Image: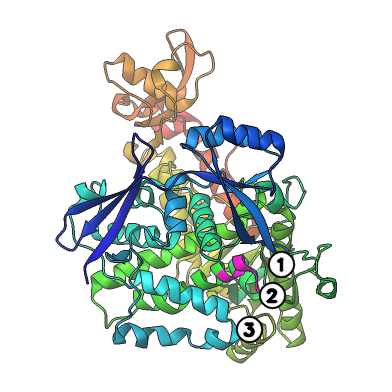
Amino acid sequence: MNELCLLDIAVTETNAIKLKFLTVNGEVKEIIDDNYKPYFLATYPLTTQEEETTNLFCGKVTTVQKTDLFSGQIRVLTKVSWPNVKIATQAAKHFRQVWENEVEFRKSYAYDNGLVFGAIHSENILKPVSVMPMLMEEKFKVFDETRGSDPLKHAQIRHWFDLLTQPIPQTSLSLLGIENVDAERLHTVWMLSRIANIPLTEAFHSNHVSDWLKSIIHSYLRRKNILIPTADELTKGEPTHTVAGALTVAPKSGIYFNTVVCDFESLYPSCIDSFNLSYETVNCAHGECSENKIPDFDGHVCTRQRGFYCTLIGALKELRIKLFKPASKNDALAAEEKKKAAEVAKLLKLILVSSYGVTIRIHGLACPPLAEAITGYGRYALKESWRMAEMKGMLPLYGDTDSLFLDNASNEQIAWLIENVKERFHLDLAIDKQYTLCVLPKAKKAYFGILRDGTPDIKGVTATKSNSPAYINKVFQKCVNELATVKNLKEYEMAKAQVKKIVQKSTDDLKKGLIPLRDLAYSVRLYFDPNEKTDHKMIHQPYQCAIQLIDSGRKLKRGDTVSFIKVKPFKHKGRNFTVRPVESISNLGDVNLEDYVRNLFTALDQTFEPMGIKLEAEKKIEISRWLGS
């Protein structure tokens, strides 16, 4: 059997479809189809005006039957084909209502003909090859439990499994329209092309996950002969608006030892899958489903049928959790295969993470009731898990979106919570982090923890920034190292005293001139063209540095990085400047010590003040003292 791999579909100058295949010999084979034309669907029958428009623009009319997504009923529609895409777009403006006019022409051809970009097809019938070798059949058995519990999801898993386990053709990158890519990235491009049914070049260049999801949806609905709803039909008459977000339970502020953080794995995608959340299932028209209320939201979910969106998202989640993520950690596989599996797992996670966001306001995907349902169930899961933990005698400290902080919980208690959350909600709760020391301030979205290996874990407080000088970074790291071994309150009090000594010594060293100038340098990337900033009255410090470098003959552009040291104010071309380029500093007396000490204490206080570590700085530093004069 001859096999062809679909790389791309193009539209010729004569508006014909040109398919670009790769043969087993590594050669490109092109097939022309001039019978397929762009089309949209319209109400049946057409009005007199619509018929006149059709005749005027040389359209051709046929009738088709499609399943309505929301009612499940068969609808008779008018299919109007046009000479080219431009005419189809213009003609659509003269129809009462049209469907599927926004589906890209070349992708429409692939969807209608059962083709999959990046996949291997039989040359005789141009359909994806789906004969699974025995080895792959064994691997597929990990999905057996979905066969009976969720046959629609099982079928979709099988569809993608067949595609993703096909071999990757070996060919030159130039034939693919791709340049400078490593093996793992190239493998991921092939996988994305097959998952989302998009051309190889688009899979390589596109970073718009919403476009991937839109193609996944359109491909599925066409394959099932379901009418693709319009953007207005998907929003269900509601304008896009801000959706109630995740639940954050106020922290029980304090200092804790042996804190366990449990995390819902892929919370929103899991809610979509577990609670049957889809465009047609949220607020369905079935009277008997109205009792299946959505928590914290005036709506309900269908109990009669499985939704298509949760089927797709659930299938992707299963593939990630049961196939690619385990493979990425399987030491029996070659290192290269593990890397490839890890990259595909990351790709699937990216799609899954975006599955909620696109329902808020992306055109053609937005559905406010669906978005509200997803966050509603997310809040419900966290709230109920908190309550279950309390009932079991655990002490929940803080809850944020998909994370639950537990104080000194035993292994048995945690195992019980994980098992019962799985049984009740069909959601996966797992231990994410374990802190020997955890400090929770009163504010939400902020905490400081020391992991069991001594690594600091900080959220919501920026102790140091990426462009902070090495001086500040080194002081902060010394303080963290002092806290890393703390196991109890007594050791904590001793560590607090040591932190204060470290900070005091660092400021003393600064005053004595013991800090190398290179450790005082800030390195900042220029986000604007510095040549356009020369005439501005107020100039930020990175551009003060850039202007001085340009004046010295150096060429700079947007995106370049400059390094500077903060100095006492001086005049440069009549304007007050407060920094100098690193290479132009020779006199230590120029350095603005007050600024460095102030920045050091500001940075450290954000992390250490909530821990009860109050750092005291001198209000003013006399430069003469620092110089020793």
Which element is circle 3 on?
helix
Query: Which comes before the other along the chain, label 1 or label 3?
Result: 1
Residue placed under numbered mark 2 in the picture:
305
Q: What is the x, y in percent for residue 385?
A: 71, 78
Q: Which residue in the structure is indicated by mark 3?
A: 422
**Total numbered circles:** 3
SS at badge 1: loop
Depth check, mark 2 against mark 3: the one in front is 2
Q: How is the image coloured?
A: rainbow
User: Residue at image x 67%, y 67%?
Assistant: 277
Q: CA distance from mark 1 to mark 3?
A: 23 Å
**Residue type at numbered disc 3:** Lys
Please tell me whether residue 466 is drawn above or below residue 445 in the rendered image: above
Query: Which one is earlier in the sequence, the residue at label 1 or at label 2?
Result: 1
Label of residue 367 in the image: none
Residue 403 visible: no
The residue under label 1 is: 281
Residue range highlighted in magenta: 305-311
Report the mark closest to the observer, 1 or 3: 1
Query: Percent from the top left, x then y, of residue 406?
Result: 65, 77
